Amino acid sequence: MTRLKDSPRRSGLPALGIGLLVVLGALAGATAYTGSQTVQTQEDLASTLKAQVNASGYARVTSSTYQRGFLSSTQVLNVMLGKEGEAGSVPIIITNRIQHGPLPGFKTVGNALIDTEVKFADAALQKKVEEALGGQQPVIRTVVGLDGSTNTHFEVPKGQFSDQGAAITWQPLTGDVSNGLSASSRIDWPEFKVTSPEGNLTFSGLSGSGTTRKQNADDLLGVGDQTMTLKSLTYSSTSGEAKGNFTLSDLKAGGKSTLDGGFYNAALLYDIGQLALEMPGSSAQNYKNVQLHLSMNHLSREPLSRLAKTFSELGKQSQANPNQTPDVSDAQQKAMLDDAVALLKSQPVLSVDRVSLTQPSGEIVLTGKAELPGAAELSSENVEMLSASPLAALGLAKLQAQFKAPEAALRELLTNLAPEAVQNLDGMIQAGMLKREGTLLVSDMAFESGAGTVNGQALGGGF
């Protein structure tokens, strides 16, 4: 096992790893070269990459050079890892070696083949990293297709190192990213483990994949789906402020977006097979089948696309000047307001499709839906008036929610999370806020035209 001896009292290498991932992500998103492009175009692309790296907040490009040859070119970026103004920033050097098409390096067919190399500027630190990786080198290779699409493959070899009594080991990280009108991504990381006197952390079975399809190059929304899974995550510590145990297994997180008749629909899903935690001063808690399913439907695509374009333009301003607030013109403000009104008038629907967890004594489930039927007659002037009185805006809304839980399961959950609330449970049952249906406690909530009901009983007040 490699011993990293010359670090300060608190190791900065894990943070450097995060910074490198940020930089590599920017590289994957910004690298696009063709054999017919001019030096000026390449310099423009270098500026784009510089802006993206700077916008990450964890790294900044201090200088870049580009040397073009007949069959190959080289781009070098000097990058500083760490937030500007903070002590401990670490310089790295990113080198893109570009072989021009149509047969770049006689290895593939395309406009270019790009091999990216990332090294620490400090030779001693770079040597320690190479030792930690067992002498193997990370691989980042991008093929630029004849149509301008890009396919990037990356590999980080398995490795291990120790520092200040802590040991970090990991299995190989691999992934692929394809960009174009049809884009896809894949990442696999079998295991990452940290052991230290303060505690131990292990995650295993991390994988992710996704696809996105765009109608044209100006389509900033696209449709598609993304999924991330994690087999297990465990943490344990027997001392210090972070004392306790935490176990998560079978996590699946994902999102999906679709188009239906000119309306954009999106869903967000989180599922956890089991979640267990034990902290000082509290009893052990164990939850199964934890689910959070949300969706937003019936969003008018045209105003949503225009808003996305405006925010993209403002984002480019932020990238160019990270320390300066973007300058929003009066025309942009009016356009954003008009598009927001059009979006609301399309009457989108926010659905809580499912929030649930399973206790030993049963499953607790919450579902709900929020609509805006009153938004059909909205105008920009109405929105400005309502923004000054948000409570009045509730008169436009229609809300529905249903809560169901076995009484024993609800009491068990409240005992663990909010013991003082258990005392109020009987009062809520007596007041009709919760009603018994067999072994279940049920609450049906509704709100429309400024008035609300719970289990059919009117609530006081209104809007």
Image: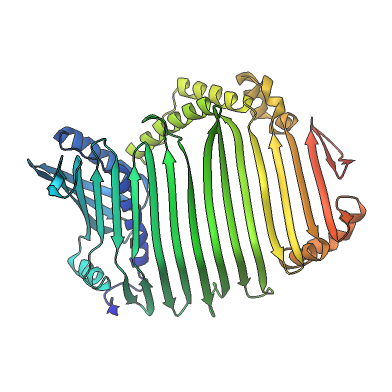
Q: Is residue 237 visible?
A: yes
Where residue 161 appears, x then y in whole percent? Answer: 32, 75
Q: Quadrant of residue 327?
A: top left
**Residue under the point 54% across and 80% down:** 238
Q: Is residue 54 visible?
A: no
What is the quadrant of the C terminus in the image?
A: top right
Where residue 149 appears, x then y in whole percent? Answer: 29, 39
Please say if 153 is above or below 242: above
**Residue under the point 37% across and 48% down:** 56
Q: Quadrant of residue 436?
A: bottom right
Residue furthest right in the image: 430
Q: Quadrant of residue 131?
A: bottom left
Q: Nearer the viewer, residue 402 or 216?
A: 216
Would residue 247 appear left or right of 211 to someone viewing this image? right
Where residue 341 appears, x then y in whole percent? Answer: 59, 24
Would residue 316 appear left or right of 384 to someone viewing this image? left
**Residue under the point 25% across and 48% down:** 142
Where residue 135 appears, x then y in whole percent? Answer: 21, 71
The scheme the figure's colours follow is rainbow
Would residue 49 appear left or right of 57 to someone viewing this image? left
Total marks shown come to 0
Please say if 232 is above or below 254: below
**Residue under the point 68% across and 33% down:** 390
What is the quadrant of the N terminus in the image?
A: bottom left
